[in-house]
Amino acid sequence: MCESSPTKRARLSLIKPIIKGIGSILIVILLPGCEVSFYKTFRGDTMGTYYRVVGQCRDSLTYQLLESELLSLTSVLSNYDEASEISSVNRSESIGEWVPAHETLVTVLVAAQQISEQTNGAFDVTVAPLVELWGFGVKDVTQPPSTESIKQELRRVNYRLLELDENNNTLRKLSNIKLDLSGIGKGYGVDHLAEVLDNQRCTDFLIDIGGEIRVQGHNALSNSWRVGIEVPDGTGQSEVFLSLSSGALATSGSYRNYRVFDEKSYPHVIDPRSGYPTSHNLTAVTVYRSTATEADALATALFVMGFDEALEFAESNDVAVALTTWDADSEKHGASYSTAMKALINEGN
Ligand code: ADP
Ligand code: MG
C-alpha cells in the first residue's frame, strides 16, 4: 500500500493524473509516483483495443498469465479470428441440430440472451449479418446497403433463432444465423480477468478493456477508485465522477466507430428491429452494473433504444445510467442521469 502524507496527497491531487483510454468516454484517475506500492500495472492490446490492469495481489500476477487468458478468450469469442469457435459456429451449416460448443461461448451467449429478453431484442447477437452489411464487420463496404438487402438479412436476425443448453454445452441454430459478440465480448473479458485476479488473491484492482471497466477495493492511496464520465461538450471539463469500490461501467456510443455514406454518419450500433444503424440525439450511454458483461450489453441495448426509452428502462429497472446527447438545433451537448446514477454521483462527491 502506498504510504501517503497529507502534503503528498495534496501534490498528487494537483497533478491531475488523468489517463484517458483511447477514444474512451470513461476517465480513470490513477496515481503516479507512488514509491511504496505493491500495485502493479499491466498494459497491452486485445480485442482490437487496449487493456489495462492495475492490481494489488498476494500471489504473482504476470503479463504471461494475463496475455494467455486473453488469448484463450479471443480464440473462442473473436469474429476477427477465422480459427475461433465463434467463426466456426458462424460457418457451420447444421441447422436444427444440437452441436457441441465451447463452455465459454455458451456462457457468453446465455448472458447475451438474458439481456435480449430484458431489452425486448434491442441487444441481439444475431445482428451479425446487418453489422456486415453496414460495413462494421471484417469486410469494408463503400455503399450503404439497399432496402431490399436489409429486408432480406432481417429475416435471420432474431435471438430466438438460437437455442442454448447450458447443462450440456450445446447450441442449436434454428435458421442460417450469424453471431457477433463485439457488443458483449469486452465486458466478458473484463469479468474473466476479474476472476483471474481473484484466483491470484488480488484484493484491490481496476481492469479496463477498451473503456469497459471493473473495479474492486481501493486504489494505491486507500481511496475508492475514481472514474469520470466525460460529457463531450468541448470544454473538456464537464466530467462527473464516481467513487467506486466494486462494480463495472461500460459505454456505448456513436462517437467512436461510425461510417459515412453520402455525408451522413451511421454509428456501429444497429437496431435489430429495423435493420438500420441507430439515428437519434444520443451520443453515448454509460451503464453501471455489478458485472462488466451485463454493463457492456446493456449499454449497447440502451443506445439502440434512444433517449426516452433508455431513461424509462433505467428508471423502471433501477439501473444507474448516464446519457449524453447532442441537440443539432441548439448545437448543444447535454447530459442526463437516471435516479440510481444520480445517487452514485452524489456518493462520490
Ligand atoms: P464498443 O464495441 O465500442 O464498446 P458496443 O459495446 O456498443 O461498442 O458494441 C458495438 C458492437 O456490437 C458493434 O460494432 C457490432 O459489432 C455489435 N452490435 C451492433 N449493434 C448491436 C446490437 N443491437 N446488439 C448486439 N450487438 C450489436
Ligand atoms: Mg456493448
Image (cartoon, rainbow, N blue to C red):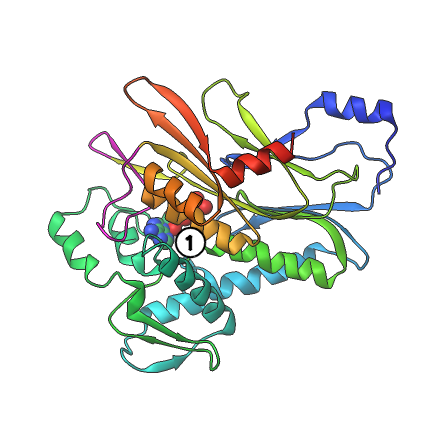
Residue 138 visible from this viewpoint:
no
Residue that sits furthest to the left in the current view = 148
- Give the quadrant of residue 190: bottom right
- Of residues 167 and 15, which is closer to you in this image? 167
Q: Is residue 179 above or below residue 31?
A: below
Q: Is residue 10 above or below residue 302?
A: above
Please report the residue visible at 56 percent of the width from the left and 29 percent of the height from the top: 240
> Taking 18 as reference, is 222 left or right?
right
- Of residues 271 and 267, which is closer to you in this image? 271
Please give the residue where the numbered disc 1 appears in the rendered image.
182
Q: Quadrant of the C terminus?
A: top right
Residue 147 in picture, x, y percent from top left: 13, 48
Residue 69 in picture, x, y percent from top left: 61, 62
Q: Which amino acid does the dot numbered 1 rest on?
A: Ser
- Under circle 1, the secondary element is loop
Residue 53 visible from this viewpoint:
yes
- Give the quadrant of residue 201: bottom right
Q: What range is drawn magenta here?
A: 261-280
Task: Decide whether residue 268 is among the magenta residues.
Answer: yes
Number of numbered discs present? 1
Is most of the magenta stretch helix, strand or loop?
loop
Q: Is residue 233 above or below residue 321?
A: above
Residue 341 in picture, x, y percent from top left: 53, 38
Q: Is residue 7 above or below residue 108?
A: above
Residue 180 in picture, x, y percent from top left: 37, 58
Ligand 1 closer than 8 Å to label 1 CB = yes
> Taking 309 as reference, is 133 left or right?
left
Task: Decide whether residue 278 is among the magenta residues.
Answer: yes
Q: Quadrant of the N terminus?
A: top right
Please report the residue visible at 48 percent of the width from the left and 46 percent of the height from the top: 319
Q: Residues within 10 Å of mark 1 (few under 14, many from 20)?
A: some
- Of residues 337 and 189, which is closer to you in this image? 337
